DNA sequence: AAACGTGCCAACCGCTATTCC
DNA sequence: AGGAATAGCGGTTGGCACGTT
């Protein structure tokens, strides 16, 4: 049984606010304040609106000192910096931009700024290494087979894996994997959305980590949320630093869990950078397998994707004394191709991760 | 000129967190 | 302590404006 609605939906007006409603609300709040009770406010103010709607209208449009119009470079910079640091916590970001609302910033990011930054990232050049060998796959977890998630494609110049389904995993997660989650929780949490593989297998999104919630910077997403005209999108993931002493082994990506030799299962390193475009021939997925900071293998799909970038330490994104510039952020994006290429299919090239390996994200279970 | 596509943004929805009783 | 009410948040949607075909 769900909660009772906050208002009588049938007798509540929805849609755009009229100037009369605006002035009623404004007048009432300026005279009486909100009284700390938005639910009761519309009735007192003589409005046929839901309290939530009134609150939103006030906060996003009517309250004093709201700034509308173009974002400045300084604001761009601040948004990028904060997004890199804390992800899509718009209310927190808005708190650092006087006069801007979270809604404003969110819209601005989704419609303009993200594209602006993505446009600065050149397509990386790389070739696909082999898919991780089967002995790396853990057997105790019902992850789907490789072919259910990826199909190997070949064109005149390269071969690459195409995700059988656009991975919306990064975006659809609604909770991060916490350090104390059990495996069964990961796999059986019914509250989490699932996606279906080409083979019809349902995969819980909880099999993936949500980097956005854990100080990862990502640009772009799956095709459904791409709004650019050509449907192109890509993403860059920033992780947080793994300490030298952290034991890490295995990885999870694309619905798989891999367990490199010699490491216990209770420490999982996951580093999946997945970029996609909706251009028919441009889908990219990139996964790096590492263990203890040493790169074991890498497989990379297609050429248009953007490999995960090495971010500055989180402290770099200080919200109060930020010295980063928009150029810094641009540079982070544009240099993202550098780490993504590895010429060695059997890949034991440790140089690859000289910087990137500082920024893995990981979890325990 | 009409139809269609795209970008934008205000507003809504559903969820979690917090407060209140 | 626990359930209900409310606040707050982030993702998504609807619809308008404008551009393109």
Image (cartoon, coloured by chain):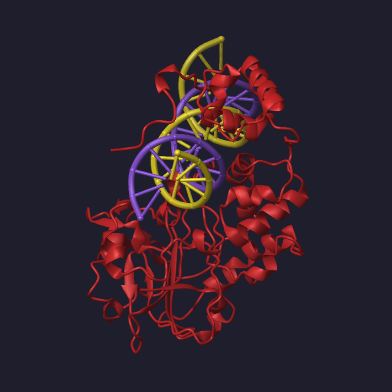
Chain colours: A red, B yellow, C purple
Query: Tag count in the figure?
Result: 0
Residue A191 x, y percent position in the rendering: 32, 52
Query: Which quadrant would the C terminus of chain A be assigned to in this image?
Result: bottom left
Residue at (55, 55) in percent of width and height: A219
Q: What residue is at 77 percent from the left and 51 percent from the top?
A: A74
- Between A86 and A286, the one nearer to me in the picture: A86
Q: Is residue A18 left or right of residue A6?
A: right
Q: Quadrant of the N terminus of chain A?
A: top left
* Residue at the outermost bottom position: A262
Dividing the picture into quadrants, the one containing residue A319 is bottom right
**Which percent across, then down, holds residue A126?**
50, 70
**Percent position of residue A91, x then y:** 61, 48
Q: Position of residue A210 (x, y in %)?
A: 45, 61
Question: Is any atom of residue A153 visible in this view?
Answer: no
Q: Nearer the viewer, residue A17 or A212?
A: A17
Question: Compared with residue A112, is residue A187 higher up or lower down, i.e. above or below?
Answer: below
The front one of A324 and A191 is A191
As drawn, is A182 to the left or to the right of A335? Answer: left
Picture layout, residue A132 above or below residue A77:
below
| Residue A224 visible in the picture | yes
Residue A230 vs residue A11, the one in the foreground: A11
Q: In percent of the image, x 41 and y 23: which residue is there?
A: A9
């Amino acid at each position: 049984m769900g909660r009772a609605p906050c208002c009588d939906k049938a007798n509540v007006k929805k849609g755009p606010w009229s100037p009369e409603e605006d002035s009623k609300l404004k007048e009432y709040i300026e005279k009486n304040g909100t009284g700390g009770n938005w639910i009761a406010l519309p009735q007192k103010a003589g409005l046929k609106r839901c309290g939530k709607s009134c609150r939103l209208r006030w906060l996003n449009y009517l309250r004093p000192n709201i700034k509308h119009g173009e974002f400045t470079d300084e604001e761009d910079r601040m948004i990028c910096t904060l997004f890199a640091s804390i992800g899509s916590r718009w209310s927190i970001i808005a708190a650092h931009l006087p006069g801007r609302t979270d809604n404003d910033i969110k819209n601005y990011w989704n419609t303009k700024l993200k594209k602006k930054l993505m446009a600065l990232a050149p397509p990386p050049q790389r070739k696909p290494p082999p898919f991780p060998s089967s002995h790396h796959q853990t057997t105790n977890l019902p992850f789907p087979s490789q072919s259910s998630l990826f199909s190997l494609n070949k064109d005149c110049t390269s071969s690459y894996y195409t995700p059988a389904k656009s991975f919306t995993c990064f975006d659809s997660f609604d909770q991060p994997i916490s350090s104390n989650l059990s495996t069964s929780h990961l796999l059986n949490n019914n509250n989490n959305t699932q996606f279906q593989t080409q083979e019809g297998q349902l995969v819980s999104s909880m099999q993936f980590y949500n980097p956005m919630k854990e100080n990862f910077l990502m640009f772009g997403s799956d095709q459904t949320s791409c709004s650019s005209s050509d449907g192109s999108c890509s993403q860059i993931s920033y992780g947080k630093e793994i300490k030298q002493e952290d034991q890490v082994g295995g990885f999870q990506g694309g619905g798989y869990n891999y367990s490199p030799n010699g490491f216990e299962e209770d420490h999982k390193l996951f580093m999946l950078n997945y970029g996609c475009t909706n251009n028919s021939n441009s889908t990219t997925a990139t996964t790096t397998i590492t263990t203890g900071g040493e790169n074991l293998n890498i497989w990379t799909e297609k050429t248009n994707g953007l490999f995960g970038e090495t971010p500055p330490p989180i402290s770099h994104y200080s919200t109060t004394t930020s010295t980063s510039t928009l150029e810094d952020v641009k540079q982070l994006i544009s240099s993202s191709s550098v780490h993504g290429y590895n010429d060695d299919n059997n890949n034991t090239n440790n140089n690859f991760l000289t910087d990137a390996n500082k920024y893995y994200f990981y979890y325990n279970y």
